[in-house]
Image: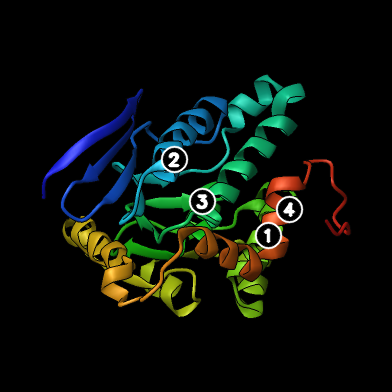
Amino acid sequence: MMSTDSFSKDGIHLERDTLSGVFTIYMDRGENRFNPSLVEDVGKALKVVEEADHPKALIITGKGKFFSNGLDINWMGKYPEKTPSMIEGVWKLLGRILILNCRTVASINGHAFGAGLFMALACDYRIMRTKRGFVNFPEVNLGMRLAKGFSELAKAKCSISTLREGVLTAKRYGSTDAIAAGLVDEECPLEALQMSAAIMAKGGLADNLRLANFNPDTFSQIKIELYTDAYRALTMGTAASPSHSRL
């Protein structure tokens, strides 16, 4: 694989395979918790992908023990007055991933909790390492509500039975259980994760799908049509939106 660096800042690194066109966003900030800095820098990397010509696809992955350990609770405790706008910034980022005009793959290298799992769910496909790492909806364990952006995304991507079990019991899913629940599509050993994610991403290129008239703009529009409620909640919702609201 021949690759070029497209963006790099403080552990958020974007590179592109120049042969296939597949981009990879690497998050290497320890637990990769969502705070304004991570949202901003992942957003800048994502903008490069959004503006790139086809053929292209995107893989999002972490480094080490965590894919992402969710919202930055310490930051939220320090800046409670800024927390609502930060959460809305996370939603807008996930909304961009949700409707990106190419295939997206979450390569889950370790734990994906809370907002980390929601980032993976925003992708089209998910592949998870075996043996170590869990995916988890921790809100009921933390005494928190999901809030509209996260709840609508979960409803768009998860079955009723998985929502009941995963959200209402805060179950931690290893890779095999996550496949059974429909939270991820494939599992593989860590040493094969990067290659397997690349194969999954390249499988979505228009030529490999033998698509006669692929149009990136309509591809994005189809995603909006598939995930309308999630997209509206992620892009138009507020952290203060009531639980019963419809956007």
The first of marks 2 and 3 along the sequence is: 2
Amino acid residing under circle 2: Leu
> Mark 3 falls on what kind of element?
helix
The first of marks 2 and 1 along the sequence is: 2
Q: Which mark is residue 233?
A: 4
Q: Which mark is residue 27?
A: none
Q: Are marks 4 and 2 in contact (CB under 8 Å)?
A: no
The first of marks 3 and 4 along the sequence is: 3
Which residue is situated farthest in the left direction here?
1
User: How busy is the neighbourhood of tag 4: few (under 14 within 10 Å), some, or many (20 plus)?
Assistant: many
Amino acid residing under circle 1: Ala
Residue picked out by circle 2: 46
Q: Are marks 2 and 3 in contact (CB under 8 Å)?
A: yes
> Mark 1 falls on what kind of element?
helix
Amino acid residing under circle 3: Ile
Q: Is residue 14 visible?
A: yes
Q: CA distance from mark 1 to mark 3?
A: 12 Å
Q: Residue at x 69, y 47 (%)?
A: 235
Q: CA distance from mark 2 to mark 1?
A: 19 Å
Instruction: Tell me residue 56's x, y (percent).
Output: 32, 54
The quadrant of the image that shows the C terminus is bottom right
The first of marks 4 and 2 along the sequence is: 2
Does 242 appear above or below 221?
Answer: above
Instruction: Tell me residue 68's x, y (percent).
Output: 45, 44
Q: Is residue 42 left or right of residue 93?
A: left
Q: Which mark is residue 97?
A: 3
Residue picked out by circle 1: 230
